[in-house]
Amino acid sequence: MKIFIFDGSLEGLLTAVFEYFERRDKGHRRSWQPGDAVLRTKESWHPDAFSTEIHIHSDPEKASRVWKGLEKRLDRAALRRLYCCYLAEKPAALDQLFGFCNYVFSGGSPDNYGHVHVQEVAAYAKSVEREKHRMEAFIRFEELLDGVFYAAIDPDFNVLPLIAKHFRDRFADQPWIVYDLRRQYGLHYEHGKLEEIRMSSQPKIAAAVLDKKEALYAQLWKDYFKSTNIASRKNTRLHVQHVPKRYWKYLTEKLPS
């Protein structure tokens, strides 16, 4: 078996697809089958004496050719699933995505949900999309002394590229930062310009840098939430189903007073 080892980038993954077909035996006509080759990141790869290791060096030109080929074979929905699967950042998801691309270039249908790669890519994409919607719903901003609204997140998947448009459109008239603590990068928006940022140290917002009105706003919201709550209709199991506990850290009404 051939093991393609890459740097974890989308460009590297697409380069690996190019290299797979470039290195395939001449005259090979058999369609791609699961297990023909596997993809591993440098971090997840372990030497294997029984496999052929191929180290991939990301090549923008090769990656561009593969992407253009995918655009010809996939509709917008399928391209979206492909990208979301990549954002899952799971080694297994990347391997399935590698197989999916090779399957499509071998003539397979991206809508054949009986095929394992199509199934898995769709499943990972669904999980990422769910995380995206939850981040859009549960993120709470805090106003800093300089007037910038700040929100720290810690999503399971790399959803910042997917939620950028939502917050840019919704808060177009104010400066804001959404920072991913796990991946140590964020989005900064101001005066119609959206850019990626990285901070030299782990950002931690102290009370001293928050606008003085923040404590009042937080208390008002907690009071409102408490006054509208109907104790007799409390259904904790259903509530947790819709708002899992791991998201409570983002919600003002769930934080201790």
Image (spheres, helix red, strand yellow):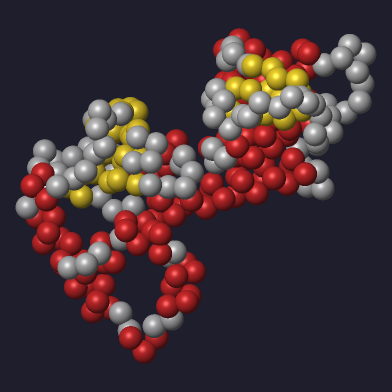
Say whether residue 18 is visible. Answer: no
User: Residue visible at 17% across and 68% down?
Assistant: 257
Taking the image as shown, residue 157 lies to the left or right of residue 221, namely: right
Q: Nearer the viewer, residue 161 or 75?
A: 161
Q: Position of residue 218 (x, y in %)?
A: 18, 62
Q: Quadrant of the N terminus?
A: top right
For residue 226, above or below residue 204:
below
Tell me which corner region of the image, top left, top right, bottom left or bottom right, holds residue 161: top left
Q: Position of residue 83 (x, y in %)?
A: 58, 35
User: Residue visible at 88% across and 28% down?
Assistant: 31
Q: Position of residue 216 (x, y in %)?
A: 11, 62
Circle count: 0
Residue most extreme to the bottom: 232
User: Residue visible at 47% across and 47% down?
Assistant: 156
For residue 137, above or below residue 184:
below
Taking the image as shown, residue 158 lies to the left or right of residue 201, namely: right
For residue 58, above or below residue 129:
above
Taking the image as shown, residue 166 lies to the left or right of residue 84, namely: left
Tell me which corner region of the image, top left, top right, bottom left or bottom right, holds residue 230: bottom left
Q: Position of residue 51 (x, y in %)?
A: 76, 24
Q: Nearer the viewer, residue 96 or 186?
A: 96
User: Residue visible at 18% across and 40% down?
Assistant: 148
Taking the image as shown, residue 205 lies to the left or right of residue 37, namely: left
Say whether residue 93 is visible. Answer: yes
Tell me which corner region of the image, top left, top right, bottom left or bottom right, holds residue 165: top left
